[in-house]
Amino acid sequence: MAKKIVILNGSPRPNGNTKSLIEAFTAGAQGKGHSVVCFDLQKMNIHGCLGCFGGGKDKHSPCVQKDDMSKIYPAYMEADVVVLASPMYYWGFSGQLKCAFDRLFAVAECNENYQNPKKQCILLMASEGDDADNAEPVIHYYEDLLKHMEWQNLGHIIAGGVLKVGDISGHKALAEAAALGASL
């Protein structure tokens, strides 16, 4: 059965290594009939969460702030799979991705006890470092995040050793991302 996939691209580079991972994953997923929508967060006007607990009153516009999250909320609510895509910044997600992800709490506010909608999730990440110790903190955070969200982890791909734009060319992670997309 075809899945609806939402990609939150936290890379500030429009054609960087993270975007190459996204393109490989998307080709694999679309090749199997899945629908994919990608939000390039750097290009969007998204403000940080206010922590106001004022959202959740309108399922069609769950947050009190009215910015470009209004474009993401409908796709997110319909999505079966959420792909978190980001370069590794100080052993975590980029600020662009963290900011948008925090704002998804407004959707949880629509539900009793702030229950998050059930999703499947994938992490795609480009990283300068290329050893297991480098990736461990972000993988640990990602897995704990999904545990607390009660989301199903479909996997993660961390393309290490890619700092400059284009360094990912020919990297094995591109084939892995395409295969992961096709496996859904």
Image (cartoon, grey):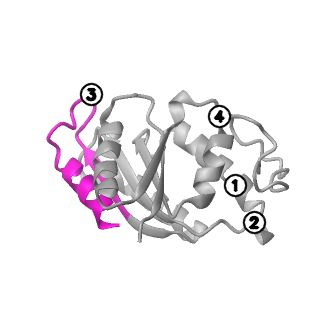
Residue 114 disc label? 2
Residue on which disc 1 sits: 105
User: Mark 2 and mark 3: span between their CA atoms?
Assistant: 40 Å
* Magenta part of the chain: 155-184
Q: Which amino acid does the dot numbered 2 rest on?
A: Tyr
Residue for point 79% across, 71% down: 112
Q: Are marks 2 and 1 in contact (CB under 8 Å)?
A: yes
Q: Is residue 97 left or right of residue 134?
A: right
Residue on which disc 4 sits: 46
Q: Is residue 75 left or right of residue 21?
A: right
User: Mark 1 and mark 3: span between their CA atoms?
Assistant: 33 Å
Q: Which amino acid does the dot numbered 3 rest on?
A: Lys
Q: Which amino acid does the dot numbered 4 rest on?
A: Ile
Q: Are marks 1 and 3 in contact (CB under 8 Å)?
A: no
Q: Which amino acid does the dot numbered 1 rest on?
A: Phe
- Please say whether residue 87 is one of the residues in the magenta stretch: no
- Please say whether residue 160 is one of the residues in the magenta stretch: yes
Q: Nearer the viewer, residue 7 or 78?
A: 78
> Relative to 96, is 155 above or below?
below
User: Mark 4 and mark 3: span between their CA atoms?
Assistant: 26 Å
Residue on which disc 3 sits: 164
Quadrant, the C terminus: bottom left
What is the secondary structure assignment of the residue under circle 2? Answer: helix
Q: Tag 1 or tag 4, which sits nearer the N-term?
A: 4
What is the secondary structure assignment of the residue under circle 1? Answer: helix
Q: Position of residue 61 (x, y in %)?
A: 76, 48
Q: Tag 3 or tag 1, which sits nearer the N-term?
A: 1
